[in-house]
Amino acid sequence: MAATSAARDPHPSRRDLRRVVAASMAGTVVEWYEFFLYASAAALVFNKTFFPQGTSEIDGFIQIMLTYAVGFIARPLGGIVFGHFGDRFGRKYLLQVAIILVGVSTFLMGCLPDFATIGYAAPLLLVVLRFLQGFAVGGEWGGAVLLVAEHAPNRRRGFWAAWPQAAVPGGNLLATAVLWILSTTLTSAQFLGWGWRIAFWLSAVIVVVGYYIRTRITDAPIFAQVQSEVEESKAQSYGVVEVFRRYPKGVFGAMGLRLAENIMYYLVVTFSLFYLTQLKVNTAEILGLMFIAHVIHFITVPLWGGLTDRIGRRPVYAVGAVLSATWGFFAFPMFDTRSTVVILAAIVIGLLFHGLMYAGQPAIMAEMFPTRMRYSGVSLGYQVTSLIAGSLAPTIGAWLLKEFESSVPIAIYLALACVVTLASVAWIRETRGISLHDVDDEDRQRLLAEKGTA
């Protein structure tokens, strides 16, 4: 089997692989720039712009975070739709649709009148555009990581597939940089009045670049092979129902892996923005610290991905979950010092812990499902968890802070999520170095056995 797998898994040239990685990252940076731009603006601007004034800052934050959660509700729907058609028609074409949809919705956000101008129609329109944005992003992730994972050599899949993951902090880095420049060059009134809109309008330029790059690549050979098999055989199928019917362990295992990682990330990069503003830390200073932290995160994610190729997917993920369980207990007291260096250290440590879980996800999830339903499988596992994890984490954090006037319950909330993720790590099998052709072979054998029984 080893020799057969090696013959069927030719190593693509480094140049070709880099081209695929660049195409995947280009669109992912754009889409997550726009998604996280909303997250940052929600914490800093929208609660003052799209909702009536007169409520407390923490209540305003909770209100805007509920609209923020709409994007996460849309993400599983996007994952289902894009996954279904991506498994049928290919990863490339669906990724092109996704980047256009998220670009248009984000640009229009920058054009919305505020609450003072059109009243409650302002948050309503914001919610509609947020839904479209989340729908597109829900379809983006699965296609982007699979484009790389299915091209990558077996022994280095963790490293190469981690690059699209690095594009996510890359997009956040870009969003933070743009907001930081605007907040430092404009007065507070100018920034809240119109300056923030520029960041949203810039998405149009970035989308054109990302779309063009994505037209220059093709789907992996393994996808073309399996696509022809599915068309020829009525015994093979794809889509959400098929994934749940045949690979429920993969779907629920992926969800469990995702839980702590997703909560951790949004506590670090979104809720901490609000927490620090409550401590009267300057907005420009917060964004500057986030910029530095995102640079470090961007650099280290591929390194952690490479580590999963050397020592295994599960050990790296487990260490990340254990360390993340401790973060809330020391990070919020570090924030309370109001010291720039100490605050930066807390954020960087949080993102380093997070990266240990985050980097290996594309390889782990790709190796859980056969090619004919891989887009649907990874999209479900990744996106559905967002409904109960990242979408609500900032809101739950704000509510816990309001109710208990302490950060300890927030730390406990994160730690409990890490326990669930650790259990999932113990449940899944180790897949380091596995051939995706072998995963497909196992799937074919199951289908033949069922056909023979029938």
Image (cartoon, grey):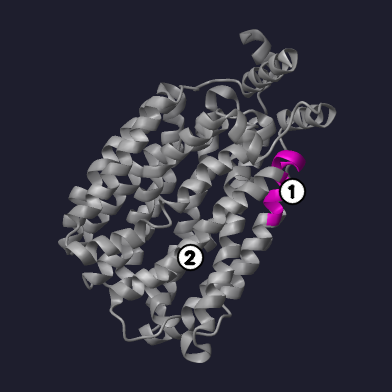
Which residue position holds label 2?
37
The answer to whether mark 2 and mark 1 are in CB contact below 8 A is no
Asked whether residue 90 is drawn in magenta, I would say yes
Question: Residue placed at 24% from the left, 71% from the top?
Answer: 278
Image coordinates for residue 309, horizontal then vertical, percent = 47, 25
Query: Which secondary structure class fits the magenta region best?
Result: helix
Image coordinates for residue 327, horizontal then vertical, percent = 24, 46
What amino acid is at disc 1?
Answer: Tyr
Q: Which residues are magenta?
A: 85-97
Dot 1: element: helix
- Disc 2 crowd rating (10 Å Cα; few below 14, some 14-19, many 20+) is many
Is residue 17 visible in the rendered image? The answer is no
Q: Give whichever of 227, 178 is nearer the camera.
A: 227
Label at residue 345: none
Indicate the quadrant where residue 135 lies. Answer: bottom right
Q: Is residue 235 left or right of residue 200?
A: right
Dot 2: element: helix
Image coordinates for residue 211, horizontal then vertical, percent = 69, 56
Asked whether residue 416 is drawn in magenta, I would say no
Q: Earlier in the sequence, mark 2 or mark 1?
A: 2
Q: Is residue 199 left or right of residue 440?
A: left
Is residue 131 visible in the rendered image? The answer is yes
Which residue position holds label 1?
93
What amino acid is at disc 2?
Answer: Leu
Quadrant including the C terminus:
top right
Q: Give whichever of 52, 204 is nearer the camera.
A: 52
Image coordinates for residue 28, horizontal then vertical, percent = 57, 52
Question: Residue placed at 51% from the left, 29% from the top?
Answer: 249
- State how far apart marks 2 and 1 are (Cα): 25 Å
